[in-house]
Amino acid sequence: MEIKLSKYCDFCFGVKRASGLIEEALEGAKGPFYSLGPFIHNPRVVEKFSQKGLKTISSLRDIKGGTLVIRSHGISPNVLKKAKALGLKLLDVTCPNVKKSQEIVSFLARQNYKIIIVGDKTHPEVKSLIGTCGASRAFVVNRSETLKKLKLKGARVGVIAQTTQSKIKYLKILTKLLEKDFSEIKIYNTICEDTLSRQKEASLIARDVEMMLILGGKMSANSRRLTQISRASGAPTYHIESASQIKPEWLKRKASVGVAGGASTPKWIVTEAVKKIIQERGDSSKCSVKLNKKI
């Protein structure tokens, strides 16, 4: 069996930066550390950090002191203001790409633009963007059909994408949006370059193998998108969080398997999966692991 491995099987820059900053802060730190929601969407990594002292909470009401980690997805200015009012210390590990998006929507709001965010309304990154520009000014669009509900006649419009959005989906929605009767439009390409590279590579690998494994948290938007892209490229695709979820029947009579990881999936989780595949085949001499080199 040939195992074709994506060359992007590790943390993206933003997650690597966030985990490094938190790890450094936790070493010999005094007082409790909290994250308002998981700091990244990978339960196994979050659990490891929990063991080191980072507690995940669902509300600021759950803490009375210590350090609040502003997670990689960012938080809204209103939540930040409440945290400061509580006297909490802050450790900001917001992804720089998300910070850039926050700055864009803040600018558009000050210039009185109607802001369209192409993404998932329930995603913490999108929630932070809505909080930054104001709920009355922001419109979240997840599919082109939603645009029918928007009244934009004569309006000045600014458009950005969730950083983990599919480029194909973003372009499809933009094409439909351009049919609307607005007076001016500003379009920003806020999709992360790492996200685009992972999507392109997953698509290429999926065309060359008999099965794909996408490793990433089930709550991870970019991992779910990789799964969708792989399936659209024609390969049976399974989205898993750990090697223990690999089923032997998936591998039966397969001569080639592709493996790709989401932006918040560390290399050690991918390595576990590769070892599990080889173990299930029963003869390591008949398995070869190749790094994809097409892009």
Image: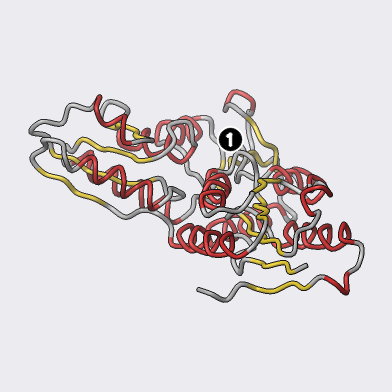
Question: x and y percent of residue 167 in the render?
Answer: 38, 53
Of the pair 192 and 252, the residue shown nearer to us: 252
Image position, residue 197 (x, y; %) = 48, 64
Q: Residue furthest right?
A: 282
Q: Up-down: is 92 above or below 260? A: above
- Image point 52% across, 54% down: which residue? 233
**Colouring mode (rainbow / by chain / secondary structure / one colour):** secondary structure
Tell me the quarter of the picture where residue 290 sits. bottom right
Nearer the observer, 239 or 33: 239
- Left or right: where 282 falls relative to 160: right
Q: Quadrant of the N terminus?
A: bottom right
Name the residue that disc number 1 marks: 36
Q: Position of residue 269 (x, y in %)?
A: 74, 56
Q: Tag 1: Cα neighbours inside 10 Å, few (<14), some, or many (≥20)?
A: some
From the viewer's perspective, is 139 left or right of 44?
left
Q: Is residue 178 left or right of residue 61?
A: left
Q: Secondary structure at mark 1?
A: strand
x and y, in percent, of residue 151 in the image: 17, 26
- Indicate the amino acid at tag 1: Leu
Residue at image coords 70%, 46%: 240
Given the current orientation, which residue lies at the most extreme front position? 253
Q: Is residue 104 above or below residue 10?
A: above
How many marks can you see?
1
Q: Residue at x 65, y 52 (%)?
A: 214
Q: Nearer the viewer, residue 214 or 247?
A: 247
